[in-house]
Image (tube, rainbow, N blue to C red):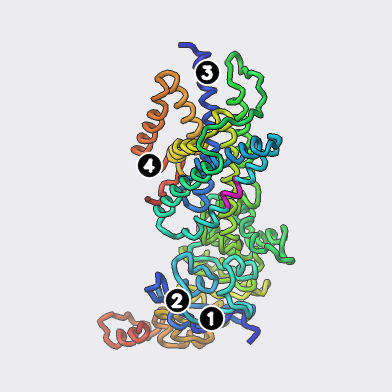
Amino acid sequence: MTDNVLEISNIEVVYNHTVQVLRGLSLTVPRSRIVALLGSNGAGKSTTLKATSNLLSLENGALSAGRISFNGEDTARQTPHGLVRNGLCHVMEGRRVFEDLTVEENLTAASYAVTGRSDGGGNGGYDLVYEYFPRLHERRRAQAGYLSGGEQQMLAIGRALLGRPKLMLLDEPSLGLSPVLVEDIFTIIARINREQQVAMLLVEQNANVALALADYGYIMESGRVVIDGTPERLMADDDVREFYLGTGGGGEARSYRDVKHYKRRKRWLS
Amino acid sequence: MDWLFFFEITLAGLGTGGLYALTAIAFVLIYKATRVINLAIGEMLMVGAYLFFGAAVGWALPWWLAIILALLGGGALGMVLERGVIRPLLGENPISVFMVTIGLGSILIGMVELIWTANPRSLPNFFPTDPIFIGEAFLAPKTFWSFVVAAVVIAVFLLLFRFWRGGVALRATASDQGAAYSMGINVPAVYSLAWGLAGVIAAGAGILLGSIGGISSDMGLFGLTVLVVVIVGGLDSVLGALLAGLLIGWMESMAGVYLGGEYEHLVTFILLMVVLLFRPWGLFGTREIERL
């Protein structure tokens, strides 16, 4: 079991001591692999990532059961910044660049991730980021708030890359980007995975793109995993095709008045 | 109108304004990093002045050593307040934290009065006493030198804020706490750093202020005007704090001379009301500031 960089077993997460969001979720991410986590809005995908990077307390959430281990160590006992310094980088939803800092200052802030590590400090990290994202080098003196959406997403991924992570948590990198940019970003993500041996847990609404990249996929509904498997298996599943890829059911338009469809959908939501 | 006199009043006003700006920066630093409205900033300033008094007069140390000790003491006080009182309250209702800082102010006053009694004291003079002339205008040497010191400290601070790696971490944390965590920035340490630096700055302002007008346990009232300065400038704006500090220092000194001493604060608070009516987020502040 040691070649899993991340193991999440049976976690439950509660917000404000009242709202239960995750109900016994388990998943694993093997070393240097990409795992996709799919699901509709409110299924608990982002919560899963925040639980992993220990950022739940910022939103008054708490892990009430279960165990998350990163690199064989329990994450509950580590601080959020400590986890980052051990190689777990979380690229949060909505990019979250420091808007009034320049691109280069954003990277300087990110360089705290390599604090206390012998490898990958110094300016080598900056060159690596600029190599993957030449566009960021052109705009390194610009304020991050004035970058385009695609450039901000590059910066968000670049900041994580600077930390030389073993595992990257990517929360909807395609959010609000044009199809062409989505393709660019995902090409670079695949390159980073291949060349830097970074494992990735990829949360996406855009199931087609995510499954094209991933080695394994999980699909969540209402706080638990309902189906998992290789991308080939998921893509072949009728329900997945219909509800996430929008291509199933023979192609004819579906109506909510269609009772059979509704019942099958309901099974997913229960 | 006597323009030379007007010019002299302006210089004196800017001298006070420099101290307002300096203290306001300490306030803004705390607000930006931890989103705490720290009403005890005036009392932190007072404690700094008394620490200097205790070291320079009580222990009869040379003035430069006393200043260093007072600055370190002020920084330590800021860190202790942050760690012991503010951090357990983070995430609570902002108004609770705000009220706690009012209480902190009273506690600091009480502690100072226990140690040094409530009697006003004067600080030993460490500024050169040669009269200062700018053109033909005369300026009290203490006012001049305290302005110079305040300006230098502000400049150093701004450079640190801009170019030092820790300054980048501070600004990153101020801009987005969650994202700062995910960069591997030790956010609680940044809080300590912000409060510590603010404590040092406040203690420095207290020493300057005390060396001009003497010290007393109620000199923390100075913080009330500083509160006006930061609201006028915009709670989270360093530039706003600087300009509003100078502006209010100048206005007070004008009002004090041309209208009479009792109008000094009247003018300040009228300005506050006007700004709150027309630009509630301040001259340079971010528009969407949290509501109290």
CA distance separating discs 4 and 1: 48 Å
Give the position of the N terminus of chain B as an image quadrant: top left
Would you say the residues marked 4 and 2 are in contact, meaning their CB atoms lie under 8 Å apart?
no
Tell which subunit mark 1 falls on: A
Q: Which contiguous range is marked in magenta? A: B74-79
Q: Nearer the viewer, residue A255 or B237?
A: B237
Mark with earlier residue (4, 3):
3
Q: Do marks 4 and 1 share a chain?
A: no
Q: Chain of mark 2?
A: A
- Tell me what residue is drawn at x 58 percent, y 21 percent: B140
Which circle's residue, 1 or 2, is located before the other in the chain?
Answer: 2
> Which residue corresponds to mark 2?
A13
Residue B7, disc: 3
Q: Residue furthest top?
A: B1
Depth check, mark 4 against mark 1: the one in front is: 1
Kindly indicate whether the residues beneath marks 1 and 3 are on one polypeptide chain. no
Q: CA distance from mark 4 to mark 3?
A: 32 Å
Q: Amino acid at mark 1?
A: Arg
In the rendered image, which quarter is residue A86 located in? bottom right
Label 2 Cα neighbours within 10 Å, binned few <14 / some 14-19 / many ≥20: many
Could you tell me which secondary element the residue under label 3 belongs to? helix
Q: Which residue in the protein does label 4 denote? A: B280
Q: Residues within 10 Å of mark 4 (few under 14, many from 20)?
A: some
Q: Amino acid at mark 4?
A: Pro
Residue under numbered circle 1: A67
Q: Which mark is in front, 4 or 3? A: 3
x and y, in percent, of residue B242 in the image: 52, 36
Residue A251 found in image quarter: bottom left
Q: Position of residue A81 (x, y in %)?
A: 59, 65
Q: CA distance from mark 2 to mark 3?
A: 66 Å
